[in-house]
Image (tube, rainbow, N blue to C red):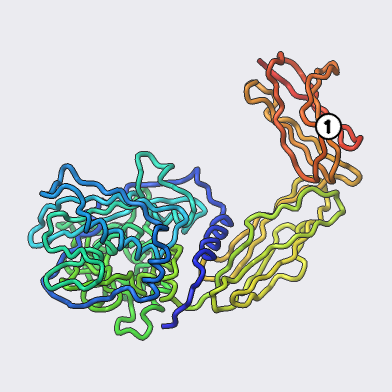
């Protein structure tokens, strides 16, 4: 498996920021729901088998961890559960150290410009027969934001925070964390060391934390079934929408699990699938499959035991298939004398399929790729006369450490915005290109266009878009004066906004008059460059009535009326 050497994580951070800005994200239409309770997400169970199997961070990962020490993308609040208390009520220092070591490993594999907040609870778990719950975790909320990710799909709060570059939790009621993790304080066989050399009969705490954070960032499906039921359902909400995890799940015959023409929702067929009677359930994505090339297991089989186990079935990789492999982290049971201090190539491939922003440690597992980076999500051509031409360019990069050509096709949906040299371009690995653009207005007014850029890059869905905007004035016209807003004005405290446009650098004088022509006050007096401007008009102390505001631009005069009601 070919490794990529990604030397500059900061460049990837810029890539993420630009790509997100290029999408039209409407945060006002954010939807969210509670995630499944943590005990329903994962009941990681210790086995009685001493595996003596260890995957420790290699030298490159350790160097990354040392280099980024103090720059964690996670922030943790350590909580002691007051209801499910243990003999030791506070987090032991050695448990805190191991927890933060695990978070540092994850911080090299995923990326977020916004710190992800983790609520880590030290608590007792009720016994469940012969099953011992070592820990549980989930997103605190599942979220949808129009324009971000796949439509009608739930994502973990952490993932959409990373994708949007916005602290989404601050927009939600009573949500202070992105991920909730519970760890069993009454389990007496923990190994809190960080060296990966877990002794006989002990369970590696770091590995369990890595596993639980994996669920918290989105390794989580929505299929649910009652113990005594013969049906299963998927989705959350009304109508039900799948989690992003569900969209990659197929049965043994490659039928989508959420295809209602194959599996009713709810249905006995779905129950049979989640209990292994339809040839198994598999995660099926391009990068997921590529990470298994040359491996004994060529499909990413999920855990579907014949007895449905809430918190274990479906939301884990298959226990037997991935035992003693680099992809063993997300199995439903953990062996003694076992440590996997890495998400593994399979999980990293699935994260890319889910479009999680990845860090350097995950990228080294994955296939070569081109990565499109836009220098801007909007280009403003300013204000020019009809018949003139304003030229600008859009800088498009193929990431410095990509090793595939970036192939792009660029189209404008408005003929007044012109591409200067064709529509198809190839950018070599690590290269960049300035795509020439021109604004050539044929009529006056504000003009808007969308530049659509189709591409073969793997870092963001194709196409990406750039907004183009320009304004034109009639020939021989120096300025345009707009109607004030609001008009009429009923809230004197907020005043009124007056906007205007200039086609060239000019001396500008803007004044307010009564309807009888008496000067009230100066609004602006000075020299300004070509462009569009907005100024606030102070209306304090004025009585109700009609006022005039007048602009003089290099001797050219325009005026409009403003109405005030007190």
Determine which quarter of the picture holds residue 170.
top left
How far across and down, in percent of the image, does residue 123 sit?
A: 18, 50
Q: Quadrant of the C terminus?
A: top right
**Is 110 placed above or below 50 here?**
above
Foreground pick, 309 / 333: 333
* Residue 399 x %, y %: 57, 71
Q: Give the camera-side residue of 314 and 235.
A: 314
Q: Does residue 259 appear left or right of residue 184 in this picture?
A: right
**Toward which corner of the image does residue 189 lie, by quadrant?**
bottom left
Report the side of 199 relative to 541 (left or right). left
Q: Look at 84% across and 44% down and name the residue there.
A: 505
Q: Quadrant of the N terminus?
A: bottom left
- Residue at point 62%, 68% (across, down): 397
Q: Mark 1: give few (<14), some (14-19) or many (20+) Cα within 10 Å.
A: some
Q: Name the residue under label 1.
A: 509
Asked if residue 411 lies left or right of residue 46, the reply is: right
The image shows a total of numbered marks equal to 1
Above or below, comparing residue 513 to residue 262 in the picture: above
Is residue 554 visible in the rendered image? The answer is yes
**Between 341 and 177, which is closer to the camera in this rendering?**
341
- Can the viewer see residue 310? no
> Percent x, y for residue 143?
40, 50
Q: List x then y, in percent, for residue 187.
A: 13, 58
In the displayed image of the protein, which residue is found farthest to the top? 543
**Residue at position x 36%, y 74% in the image:** 345
Q: What element carries label 1?
A: strand
């Amino acid at each position: 498996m070919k490794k990529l050497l990604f030397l500059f994580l900061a460049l990837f951070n810029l890539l993420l920021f630009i790509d997100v800005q290029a999408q039209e994200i409407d945060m006002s239409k954010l939807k969210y729901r509670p995630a499944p309770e943590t005990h329903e997400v994962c009941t990681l169970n210790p086995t009685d088998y001493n595996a003596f199997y260890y995957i420790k961070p290699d030298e490159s990962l350790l160097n990354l961890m040392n280099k980024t020490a103090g720059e964690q993308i996670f922030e943790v609040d350590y909580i002691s559960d007051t209801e499910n208390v243990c003999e030791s009520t506070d987090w032991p220092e050695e448990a805190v150290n191991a927890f933060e070591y695990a978070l540092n490993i994850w911080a090299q594999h995923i990326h977020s410009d916004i710190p992800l907040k983790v609520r880590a609870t030290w608590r007792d778990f009720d016994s469940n027969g012969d099953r011992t719950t070592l820990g549980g975790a989930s997103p605190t909320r599942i979220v949808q934001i129009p324009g971000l990710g796949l439509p009608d799909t739930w994502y973990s709060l952490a993932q959409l925070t990373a994708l949007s570059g916005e602290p989404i939790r601050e927009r939600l009621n009573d949500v202070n964390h992105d991920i909730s993790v519970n760890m069993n304080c009454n389990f007496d066989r923990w190994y809190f060391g960080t060296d990966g050399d877990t002794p006989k009969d002990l369970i590696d705490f770091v590995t369990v934390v890595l596993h639980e954070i994996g669920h918290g960032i989105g390794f989580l499906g929505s299929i649910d079934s009652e113990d005594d039921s013969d049906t299963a359902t998927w989705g959350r909400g009304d109508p039900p929408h799948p989690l992003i995890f569900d969209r990659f799940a197929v049965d043994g015959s490659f039928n989508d699990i959420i295809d209602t023409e194959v599996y009713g929702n709810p249905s006995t067929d779905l129950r049979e699938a989640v209990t292994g009677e339809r040839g198994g359930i598999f995660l099926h994505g391009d990068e997921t499959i590529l990470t298994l090339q040359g491996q004994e297991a060529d499909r990413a089989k999920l855990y579907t035991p014949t007895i449905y186990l809430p918190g274990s079935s479906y939301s884990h990789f298959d226990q037997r298939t991935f035992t003693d492999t680099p992809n063993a982290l997300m199995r439903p049971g953990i062996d003694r004398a076992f440590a996997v201090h890495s998400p593994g190539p399979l999980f990293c491939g699935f994260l890319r399929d889910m479009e999680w922003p990845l860090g350097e440690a995950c990228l080294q597992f994955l296939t070569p790729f081109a990565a499109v980076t836009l220098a801007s999500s909007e280009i403003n051509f300013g204000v020019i006369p009809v018949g003139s031409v304003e030229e600008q360019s859009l800088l498009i990069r193929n990431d410095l450490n990509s090793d595939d050509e970036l192939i792009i096709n660029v189209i404008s949906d408005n003929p007044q915005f012109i591409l200067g040299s064709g529509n198809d371009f190839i950018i070599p690995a690590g290269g960049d290109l300035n795509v020439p653009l021109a604004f050539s207005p044929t009529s006056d007014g504000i003009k808007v266009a969308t530049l659509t850029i189709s591409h073969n890059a793997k870092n963001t869905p194709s196409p990406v878009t750039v907004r183009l905007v320009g304004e034109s004035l009639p020939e021989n016209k120096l300025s345009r004066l707009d109607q004030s807003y609001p008009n009429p004005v009923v809230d004197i405290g907020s005043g009124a906004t007056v906007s205007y446009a200039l086609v060239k650098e000019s001396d500008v004088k803007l004044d307010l008059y009564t309807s009888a022509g008496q000067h009230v006050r100066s609004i602006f007096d000075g020299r300004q460059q070509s462009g569009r401007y907005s100024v606030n008009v102070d209306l304090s102390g004025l009585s109700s009535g009609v006022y005039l505001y007048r602009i003089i631009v290099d001797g050219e005069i325009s005026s409009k009326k403003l109405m005030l009601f007190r």
